[in-house]
Amino acid sequence: MGITYYEKERLFKLDTLASTYMCAVVDEENFLGHVYFGPRLEDHDAVYLTRTGEAPFVPSSNNRERLAFYDTFPMELPTHGLGDNRDDALAVRSALGHTAVKLGVVSHEIYKGKKGLKGLPATFGKEDECTTLEITMTDETLKMDVILSYTVFEKVDAITRSLKVINNSSDDIVLTRVMSACLDMDNEDFDLLTLHGSWARERHINRRPLTRGFQGLSSIKGECSHQEHPFMAIMEKGADEDRGEVFGMSFVYSGNFLASCYVNQFDSVRALMGINPEDFNWLLESGEEFIAPEVIMVHSSEGLGGMSRSFHDLIRNNLIRSPYKDRKRPILINNWEATYFDFDTDKLLGIVDQASKLGIEMLVMDDGWFGHRDFDDSSLGDWYVYEDKIKGGLKYLVDEVNKRGMKFGIWFEPEMISPDSDLYRAHPDWAIQIPGRVPGQARAQYVLDLTRPEVVDNVYGQVKAILESANIEYVKWDMNRPLSDMGSASLPPERMGEMFHRYMLGVYELQERLITDFPNLLLENCSGGGGRFDPGMLYYSPQIWCSDDTDAIERLLIQEGTALIYPLSSMGAHVSDCPNHAVGRVTPFKTRGYVALAGTFGYELDVTKIPEEDRNMIPDQVKMYHAYNDLVRMGDYYRVASYSQNNEYDCYMVVSKDRSEALVTFVQVLNRVNFHSRKIRLKGLDPAKKYFVTYVDDNKETSGKKGGERVYSGEMLMKAGLLIPRPWGDFQGMLISLKAQ
Ligand code: DGJ
């Protein structure tokens, strides 16, 4: 049982394999206080940690030092307006215009398994995997209930948390702030680690000391964004990849978010995560309820690496639903960087003719096949085939691709509308806009108002018709601009503040309908590269395009940051042509292959035009993918060395769950002259096992060794290290396979 209630102490103890989380009901007013989150404890005598015995911070029923109490007590769900000045999780505007909320616990329920969150993505688990605690609290003045839910994934070291607000009064209430998670802790000289980026430079790791006052990150773009990421880790100063305590928080949501930390006068930290309160006002009519998305919390005593592996396991097993999650994905070739908008049936079939012979398994026809789209300035919303380009029609093309032994996938951008489109000419009010203002375009397009059911129905109907018209087995769902000019022709003024969240609910509904009607479809999300790579979208698609930057060296940092939270099986990664289209860098084809092998693997180039020597390497890369993808998809991931820190080389590895097999990827970014081979300490192996070490390419130039030549113990490889010869040249990659004897 992962959750125990101790009646005498009125304490809830939530246990995973290696961590414990505790909260308790305190005082006759039944405040819910945060007690502990950290390494697993067997003991539960911990209520003293709330410091309610320390004057003047006692919850004083005579009201004498009430404000001092509110401003110091570690609240599990801090509320607004009564004296807790550390930032709060819940605020309202009542019928009388008041903003305060006060919650007291009234009951709780513990049950096996986990319920879904209506309309929202969420982790799931069977009765033998997880246990849920629901604590009901009430505000007697507002007549408002809050149900705070925690689910403990006992074998994964992860706890999720979400909340539901119910208006039981006869008046309307406006919710102005609903944060899903709060973590009140003493500041033990922590660092804050977040993921920061830009278009084509997504999710770079950013670590800084946590200092007094407010700090944090947010998005107000209607998507989690290229710039910020709905994740933060609070970590001990000395914590590194393998050691030290780390508290990771990840938001299962794809829209506006806020993740903040406040270090107060007593050096306590309050970490909050939830929907961004900016531009959020939710009218909760009498009898209605509001469900806030969930946050995944992971505690690790094994540094960032331990945290990542817990997130990976949870996301792989308990968030991704697609039937593909446990399957090797078809090796695809996408025509975007190959042709951009300049393609037709013949050109695509020319690519397929070559690709099918090389072992590539699926063609993905990217942007430009619909309406009259020859450039990025038209036709979004007109999801019918551009017959001038797709000569013979879509079914003909798909059949021809299938005849050549390959599957077929297609690109959509269903959330958008071009001013130059039949859809816009028929329904200009379907574009998000504010009456009287000219809405801003980005990439010459507007965003469809997905808060309107008729818009959702229309766009879904169009997508469905295309998917039913031919044997289409994959969809790339793109989204190429942020939201702005928030105005909906259908929402009344008092509900306009709901628009960002309602938009997200519309997107989730669209994708839910898609995967329900087409259960075997392989869906890949995308947003101008990786602008919407988040746990929310992984509930619908097992993979997400990581970045429009396909350069192998840039990808080291992007994939490192992404894999901090997300399993490698979810990272869309392709081999592209050089000079790279994002940075102009020329890297060896081999290195590009090795780096893409850490993701879903595919190609993003015109296979008829690349140098012959590159093309000739594809069958070997295909073989490698088939040989190692099970391990990469399902194994434990270890960061060994980061080029972001040493400026010279990058190294990571994946180890099978039974530790019988491992794959090491090493990339020398910059060579240096007159140095020894590098000694790299491997991780995650079984110290007692002996491993055959094989340099996969068996290439003397890069490895200097013959495959399978050496056998070393796991102990030696982890404590003393493996010698990796210095390859000749910059940007050189190496793949090293380890198999237990
Ligand atoms: C952005 C995506 O990230 C690219 O891969 C490509 O699909 C383009 N959009 C097409 O417009």
Image (tube, grey):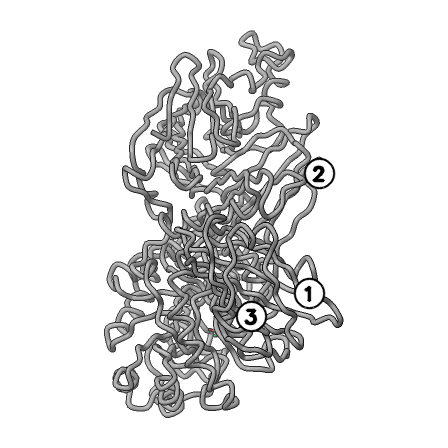
- Tag shown at residue 648: 1
Coordinates of residue 611 in the picture (x, y in percent): 52, 89
- Picture quarter containing residue 458? bottom left
Q: Tell which circle, 3 or 1, labels the residue nearer the N-terminal end.
A: 1
- Quote the CA–CA distance across marks 3 and 2: 41 Å
Q: Residue furthest top?
A: 62
| Picture layout, residue 700 above or below residue 517 | below
Which image quarter holds the N terminus?
top left
- Tag shown at residue 211: 2
Residue at 41% x, 71% y is 625
| Picture layout, residue 527 above or below residue 177 | below
| Picture layout, residue 57 above or below residue 231 | above
The three-letter code of the residue at mark 2 reads Thr
The three-letter code of the residue at mark 3 reads Met
Which image quarter holds the C terminus?
bottom left
Residue at 32% x, 78% y is 384
Q: Tell which circle, 1 or 2, labels the residue nearer the N-terminal end.
A: 2
Coordinates of residue 127 in the picture (x, y in percent): 27, 37
Mark 3 burial class by Cα count in 10 Å: few <14, some 14-19, many 20+ = many
Q: Tell which circle, 3 or 2, labels the residue nearer the N-terminal end.
A: 2
Label 3 belongs to which residue? Answer: 734
Residue at 38% x, 15% y is 7
Q: Label 3, secondary structure: give it.
A: strand
Q: Label 2, secondary structure: give it.
A: loop
- Quote the CA–CA distance across marks 1 and 2: 31 Å
Label 1 C-beta lies within 8 Å of the nearest ligand 1 atom:
no
**Is residue 243 visible to us here?**
yes
**Is residue 340 visible to us here?**
no
- Picture quarter containing residue 112? top left
Indicate which label's residue lies in the foreground, 1 or 2: 1
The three-letter code of the residue at mark 1 reads Glu
